[in-house]
Image (cartoon, rainbow, N blue to C red):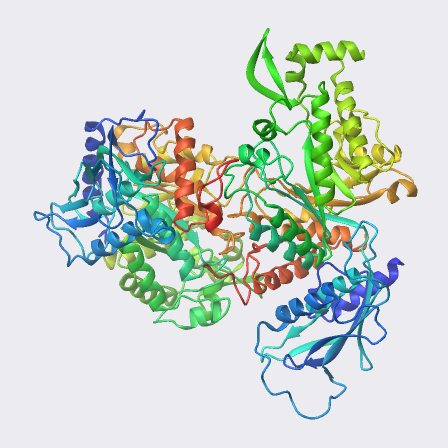
Amino acid sequence: MAGSTLWFSLLLAAAFAGRATALWPWPQYIQTSERRYTIFPYSFQFQYHVSSAAQVGCSVLDEAFQRYRELLFGSVSFHFPQPMGKWHTSEKNSLAILVVTPGCDQFPSLESVENYTLTVNDEQCLLLSETVWGALRGLETFSQLVWRSPEGTFYINKTEIEDFPRFPHRGLLLDTSRHYLPLASILDTLDVMAYNKFNVFHWHLVDDSSFPYESFTFPDLTKKGSYNPATHIYTAQDVKEVIEYARLRGIRVLAEFDTPGHTLSWGPGVPGLLTPCYSGSHPSGTFGPVNPALNNTYEFMSTFFLEISSVFPDFYLHLGGDEVDFTCWKSNPDIQAFMKKKGFGEDFKKLESFYIQKLLDIVSAYGKGYVVWQEVFDNKVKVQPDTVIQVWREEMPVRYMKEMELVTRAGFRALLSAPWYLNHITYGPDWKKIYMVEPLAFEGSPEQNALVIGGEACMWGEYVDSTNLVPRLWPRAGAVAERLWSNKMVTNLDFAYKRLAHFRCELLRRGVQAQPLSVGYCDMEFEQT
Amino acid sequence: MEHRGLGWPRLPRLLELLAALAVQALRASAIAAASPDLRLWPMPLSVQTTPRVLHLSPDNFVFSHSPTSKAGPSCSLLQEAFRRYYDYIFGFYKWHHGSADLRVGVELKQLQVSVVLDPECDTFPKISSDESYTLLVRGPVASLTANRVWGVLRGLETFSQLIYQDFYGTFTVNESNIVDSPRFPHRGILIDTSRHFLSVKSIFKTLDAMAFNKFNVLHWHIVDDPSFPYQSVTFPGLSKKGSYSSSHVYTPNDVRMVIEYARLRGIRIVPEFDSPGHTQSWGEGQKDLLTPCYNGKEPSGAFGPINPIWNTTYSFLSKFFKEISTVFPDEFIHLGGDEVDFDCWASNPEIQDFMRDKGFGRDFKKLESFYMQAVLDMISAINKNSIVWQEVFDDASKLMPGPVIQVWKVEDYTQEQSKVTEAGFPVILSAPWYLDWISYGQDWKHYYAVDPLSFEGSQEQKKLVIGGEACLWGEYVDATNLSPRLWPRASAVGERLWSHKDVRGLEDAYRRLTIHRCRMLRRGIAAEPVFTGYCDHEDRM
């Protein structure tokens, strides 16, 4: 897209300093005017266009219509008499949705097309998209365009929007191991993700602290590894519900089962899986990473990931691979012997590589792709060329932009998270720093740039649970959402502040406990229960 | 200007009280390294527990008045408290079970409350209110004894914290003997309802949580530059034009409800009407109150602090504070006095003339002091005491005795405490406890490690420290994040101000604080986690 067009559209919108400027994230191309149309809540309808490939019965859109109807007008009773008479050109009584490609029952994927165009003028009120996923994005935009006068009348301005995401992978990580998050917290987060056009829920399900994922192959994992096997777990039904809830919002669920480190909670449920650490010539009673020297380990992983591959429909699994602590491996005589036998010398990175490669082979045999944390790349594990590397370390071993350069130069696809660790909090409007990150600000060829598939905001759980999750996430994660969706040139902080502050109030109106950006107020404040 | 000095005679009484408290603290030596399974927060002065357990049944247990108590069922403050604490102890249980058989063992059937002196049921808590109590937990009747109802409230909180559910879910308490009183009489939380409006409901929640932490002062920074939500009866224009909107106001009824809700929990409401700076929002509804700033010879259209040279200013303030003094029953009013920007005053030709007439030269601190002294005198004249931010002391060449100085600047705050107390002024410490300043990780440890008396000074000087306040300024805080940002971080300050100075072991504090946080969660406060882990009932929030 030509920069001048964009700037034109920015200025144009700013000139109408009101309605269209409320959009978040900012669309790729927008034209609006002061001409406005009245919307009557009682008669307004979302309708499938006659030539749409999706029609009534399309679960994704049928449900979306209900959701957005409620978001727009609240749960008003629809039994009111309709306004009489024929419609004027100054009124809109429906939004027509035209989806070109059929398909309502599949799952979104990295390749899903999310483009849409939205046209509101005298002749039509039309949302056109290639897929149902694009229609979802367009419905969100539409809902943000509708505004209400002080007298309570709903309006939408004459608008033309052509929109598509800058990056296909726009994720949010939640950590349900350090603190358990009730199912409702996760579902609520998925809603707000959709408002921000995020499309990947990276579910860091398990870690050292607890193992809340209830495995049907290895039920002891949660029985012995969860905080409380009755209440602090995700049953198969919970997981299904999350996946379907996400699907209906065009969000992929990327499940992470991090190994070989970060696995202490796996230990109690699977004896022999973790490496016994030694103190001198005796086991110290503590355990380290997964034991890579035993065949049993790989048999277990093979069975476990067979389950995971079938439970989570997304093509990708996240296999972790970060922060493997070598001291325990070093202390263990069996591992030492294994190292000698394999000719690894004293290089434990080779042992790590050995493990990861075997794991990757297992998972690829199930027809899955995978994402791993950057250490797998840093430690020179030989991985398949289609591996996605998630860059998370800000400074080490190199600055994160340098890391992006190195990863893409090696031909791997990259995901950026390093500057977006939202669990790290500071005083003041830190969203600005988050917002000003440019994911492609590294030295590299256009081919390298093309390997950056997106990024993720991460909310690690050491200090976060359902008491503070929502205000800590929103609207700060919104800054990441716009960076990953909108045009590279949309970087003006004043313009962003105005829209984000407005969007935050809109989130409050929608019942989301989003914290303030600065001094001020919203017409509808969060109400304490 | 004549100094009326009504504030001064009050000071010695305050000192007497502080001295008495200090003696008490020495007498009952703290058993800080108490039994490892204690679940109390803040830690009482002296705790003795035995392994002997008593069981409680929700159907049998009652709070009652001892026949010798000076308070009885007509004391609604206590009746309300009994109901509240019954709910905190058993409420969750009732919800999920019906009734259960009590297993064998000694049953605790009653907590008998005895108030020794005039109970003060219908009065407001004061800085000098006696909050001490003794709690003797024995079967079948435990006793809670206090001089006043305020001590009973603190003791009920402690009693409720002693009770836990054993492995089978039975309510259990260990035989215990507790003697307790606070280290400092002023233990406050500051909330800021100007940068962001907080609903009365949010304030109630905060008061609930304050009681769980034995805080006893809500410092209500009610107005400031951004908005004026306090609805004044005398000057209704102030909130009409100065509030964010007509729904972002505290009506007289709202204020009354907050004061009463706080009173029932033994919490004072100290309102702050900060001037002469931080008053932009006053200007909307009160013409000719703020100083017009000049750009060369012309008014720039902007306004600065309150104009200290006009008589109309003082007649306005006099009427205004007369209203405040009747609306808010506490003997203290906070007058602010911080961060006065001199640029606007300096730009204004009338003020320049006034400065010349008064012989202030170019020293605007003198003008500031002139204004503050006038307001302080005004407050004395209506029989109230004042609290001010430290600048009022720092910028005065010689401040008249009377006000309490609140130390808030973090740089060299211990030196400031030395200076202020050396000059004989009582001090409230806030500098290390600005909870709106957030950072990653367990910052509660920093708040906890502070000792308010760690400055250089004589014993007499130390006695002048009447307490401290955790401040949650509102630039980035509203009802969406207030609770998790305050709790349990403010709890660290709560224990520092209540417990003996030797109670400072971090490991034990961490253990108890984690339990306390789960307890607050169970009682409906969205207190954020201290660190990785879980609470039993968190999914039921």
Q: Residue B441: percent from the left, percent from the top?
A: 54, 35
Task: Determine the residue positioned at 84% across, 51% down.
Answer: A111
Q: Residue A73: percent from the left, percent from the top?
A: 61, 73
Residue B271 seen in render:
yes
Residue at the far top in the pictured view: A281
Residue at the far bottom in the pictured view: A85
Position of residue A426 in the picture relative to residue B312 (left or right):
right
Depicted B409 relative to depicted B235: above or below: above
Out of B482 and B388, give the one closest to the viewer: B482
Depicted A239 relative to depicted A360: above or below: below
Position of residue B443 in the picture relative to residue B188 (left or right):
right
Q: Residue B78: percent from the left, percent from the top?
A: 21, 53
Q: Quadrant of residue B419?
A: top left
Residue A345 seen in render:
no
Q: Quadrant of residue A296?
A: top right
Position of residue A524 in the picture relative to residue A293 (left or right):
left
Out of A252 and A415, give the one closest to the viewer: A252
Residue at the far front in the pictured view: A217
Out of A263 and B374, give the one closest to the viewer: A263
Depicted B192 relative to depicted B450: above or below: below
